[in-house]
Amino acid sequence: MYYFDWAATAKPDESILKAALETSLKKFANPSSTHLAGGEAHSLLEDSRKRIAKVLKVEPSQLYFTSGATESNQLVLSSLIARPARGSVLISAIEHPSVLAMANNLKQAGFSIKTIPCNNAGFVTADAVKKCLTADTQLVAVMAVNNEMGAIEPIAEIAKILKEGTRPIHFHCDMVQALCKVPIDLSCVDSASFSAHKIGGARGAGLLYLKKQINMFLAGGGQENGIRSGTENIFGILTLANCIEKYRVDNQATKKDENTENTEITAKVKMSHLISGVQAAGATIIPQTRVQQNEQDEENFSPYILQITNKKFPGEVLVRVLSEQGFLVSAGSACSSHHKSSRAHVLTAMGVTGDAAQNAIRISIGRDTTINDIDALTQAIKKLLM
Ligand code: PLP
């Protein structure tokens, strides 16, 4: 089996999961219990928080464990409801459904929702954000890396625009596809979400960074400083902390994929091989500007995510046929049942419509993907398209 769906879920890091399971079986007590075993579990929890904080260059008290990025995103957006003031909330057109889905709830709670458009190349520019700002804007949500086509959004530039105003505006950033993939800087955002299973950790574990505490809409037992009540998932949290430490990206330009057998090959080399392979196979890259201009442009895309389209088969068909041949890719715009409406919005926002959108697929790679895997996939695509 050739796995090319790492952006949906990364192949788990077996050694990290096994070690975390062993530890959490030994130290199984509830971290809130005041007895000795509870204290041990609590130490594991706080040690994980400190280790993650060190990598992300923030204070441990600014990190809150959640069940995943969906929950992290929704905690931030729903916290607006607890504010006395209403006003506008700006959400980029290419956000993950876990952010977009909150728009309706916020609307019902009295907020006006504005969609920040992206350009044809998939970028939500600082200028586009500026044009949507109003005197009563409460929050702006723009993701760091788009999960469908890999654009790296200009987060620092957007933050700069937001700081120019006289009133503080909360800047929330979904950093799920950026963590351990491209360098991230938490100093310019007010909150950010992360997910363990996208970086080799367990499902059901996520993280929320909050520069400052926010008023919570949800309540409960008071864990995680009242931000996220509920007994902490020590196993998942251990996998998250260990993956963040192991796969940290301090400088993507020099970082090698140390954890693969082919240690010489960086993600960028693999992605550029993939891009030329799919082009030679007769597919078109979305957005086309990713490859039409100079090499610098490729710097603005994640070296892990590629969206392509073709003239011959609907994405859904291509995904099924490739899957039957052992290649696991993901449908782009139009795919089956519940995914259909939740993913098409990204291509639509980029102005990709009709067959180009209908026939799109996403190929995402990870630490174990080899050049041989890529060659096998592009050959299979070539046979189908040529
Ligand atoms: N945000 C982005 C950009 C994602 O790709 C995903 C995963 O699909 C999520 C949020 C949701 O993450 P989780 O599965 O941890 O809830």
Image (spheres, rainbow, N blue to C red):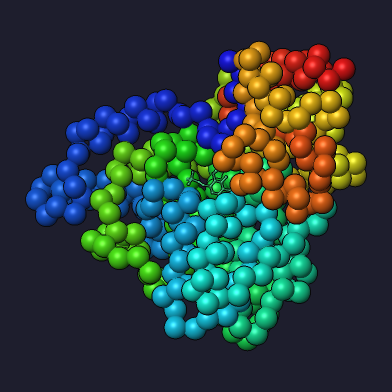
Q: In this view, does 214 lie above or below 242?
A: below
Residue drawn at the location 21% of the way across and 46% of the way down: 41
Q: Quadrant of the C terminus?
A: top right
Say if residue 343 shows up in the picture.
yes
Kindly identify the residue that appears in the image at 75 percent across and 47 percent down: 347
**As rendered, which of 338 and 215 lies closer to the eye?**
338
> Residue 255 appears at what percent x and percent y?
63, 38
- Along the horizontal axis of the image, is 190 left or right of 43? right
Pick whichever, 30 or 5, lies toward us: 5
x and y percentages locating residue 139 in the rendered image: 57, 72
Which residue is situated farthest in the front direction here? Answer: 337
Residue at the image point whose x is 74% and y is 62% from the top: 117
Corner quadrant of residue 268 = top right
Q: Position of residue 375 (x, y in %)?
A: 74, 17
Q: In this view, does 217 lie above or below 143?
A: below
Q: Which residue lies furthest to the right in this view?
A: 293
Q: Which residue is drawn at 38% across and 52% down?
A: 66
**In the rendered image, which quarter contains the N terminus?**
top right
Q: Quadrant of residue 333?
A: top right
Q: In which quadrant of the rendered view does residue 302 lie? A: top right
Q: Is residue 34 toward the left or the right of residue 357 in the image?
A: left
Looking at the picture, how far across and down is residue 172, in whole percent?
56, 64
